[in-house]
Amino acid sequence: MTKKLNRPIYVTQPALPPLEEFADYLRQIWDSKILTNNGPFHQQFEEELAEYLGVKYLSVFSNGTLALVTALQALRITGEVITTPFSFVATTHSLWWNNIKPVFVDIEPEYFNLDPEKIESAITPQTTAIMPVHVYGNPCNVDKIQRIADTYGLKVIYDAAHAFGVTVNGNSILNYGDLSILSFHATKTFNTIEGGAIICHDKKTKQRIDFLKNFGFADEVTVVAPGINAKMNELQAAYGLVQLKHVDEYIDKRKSIAGIYRNMLNNVNGLRMLNDIPGVRHSYTYFPVLFEEKSYGVTRDEVYEMLRRNNINGRRYFYPLISQFPTYRGLASAKPENLSIGSLIANQVICLPIYPDLEEKYVIQLCKLLTKK
């Protein structure tokens, strides 16, 4: 029988850069006394990050939620926006904060992204945009979504919070749509403790985004829009510069852990894992597993509690659906019968621990618990 782990294992744990490397940047900040307001590390971080990600224009933010809120302002989105119920609540909250009505559309069953086949039937004269999510970093069907957007004159804003460094046939997934938004929260593959970014495709749009994230200031005496304070400070930017030197190593370690899971859990009846997509470079932000009660023998929640008793803290990402929260469940599009795939997945999923410092022996012990050995 597998023994209880001797220390708690969490679904994720932040990868921290070498302290001595970060200290060199801190000394420079202490010497300059520049802490914020588009300082030198902020500018350097934007440049190096854009180069790493393979995108033309990028604006860094203090966090990903403010990046989402600002992206909607930047494109002047109003009315209704079609989005997914299977995501973290910040996706939909960003719409609500902009007085935009979210319209939920069900997800597809293979990778749990917004189902393009169900988007058109949700479009009304009030629809102005589509906000899909690259769930767990698996790319949406960007071509189909773009064709629908072009046909109906809609904007596309991708919540790419899980998709740092993800490419399709060598091209960054962030180059699709009108804007893409990243999160650099401590739980992500790449973190700046808190942080985020908006990726756009032209200089004029970046300029508007930069105005909006700094109260709307165009210069010392000119305010061009009702902006917000969403600037990334110099400490976060410096931390990000150090992280960039190590992020490929972090991704490789995550990939190795995913490989152990796939190898040990491959033939477990009633347990489903997602396969890597051919041509896609994944970032392995999460490792979701589905439990089908009839075949596996117990419910997902029973598995979840069993893991907790054994000091393993998986997370039911994303349960419940956003559409089931009190703020949103009164919407017509939130009816469970319209979101049957999303409801099914939300009731079956557990994200297993995956982070660079997770030791192989703990991954093996976890797998033995799930294989009932």
Image (spheres, grey):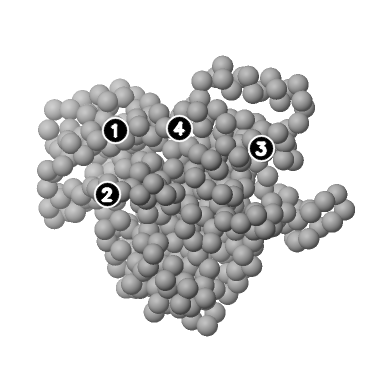
| Residue 319 placement (x, y as % from top left) | 37, 54
Question: Separation of disc 1 and disc 2 at Cα?
Answer: 19 Å
Q: Which residue is mark 1?
A: 257
Q: Which mark is residue 42?
A: 3
- The residue lying toward the viewer, choosing from 276 and 328, is 276
- Distance of label 2 from label 3 (alpha carbons): 35 Å
Question: What amino acid type should be assigned to the residue bearing mark 3?
Answer: His
In the rendered image, the residue lying farthest to the right is 221
Q: Secondary structure at mark 3?
A: helix
Which structural element holds mark 2?
Answer: loop
In the rendering, at what x and y percent does residue 249 appear? 40, 29
Q: Which residue is mark 2?
A: 278
Q: Name which of mark 4 and mark 1 comes first in the sequence.
A: 4
User: Which mark sits nearer the N-terminus, 1 or 2?
Assistant: 1
C-alpha span from label 4 to label 2: 22 Å
How packed mark 4 is, by other alpha carbons closer than 10 Å (few <14, some 14-19, many 20 or more), is: many
Q: Earlier in the sequence, mark 4 or mark 2?
A: 4
The image shows residue 170 at horizontal and vertical percentages of 39, 46
User: Which of the 4 image quadrants contains residue 336?
Assistant: bottom left
Q: Is residue 355 left or right of residue 362?
A: right
> Which residue is at a point 40% across and 62% down the rendered structure image?
142
Residue at the location (27% across, 49% down)? Answer: 278
Does residue 228 appear in the picture of this structure? no
* Residue at 51% across, 20% down: 18
Quarter containing the N terminus: top left
How many other residues sit within 10 Å of disc 2, few (<14), some (14-19) or many (≥20)? few
Q: Secondary structure at mark 1?
A: helix
Going from the N terminus, do you reach mark 3 or mark 4 first? 3
Q: Are marks 1 and 2 in contact (CB under 8 Å)?
A: no
Question: What is the C-alpha distance between the residues marked 3 and 4?
Answer: 18 Å
Three-letter amino acid code at the position of disc 1: Ile
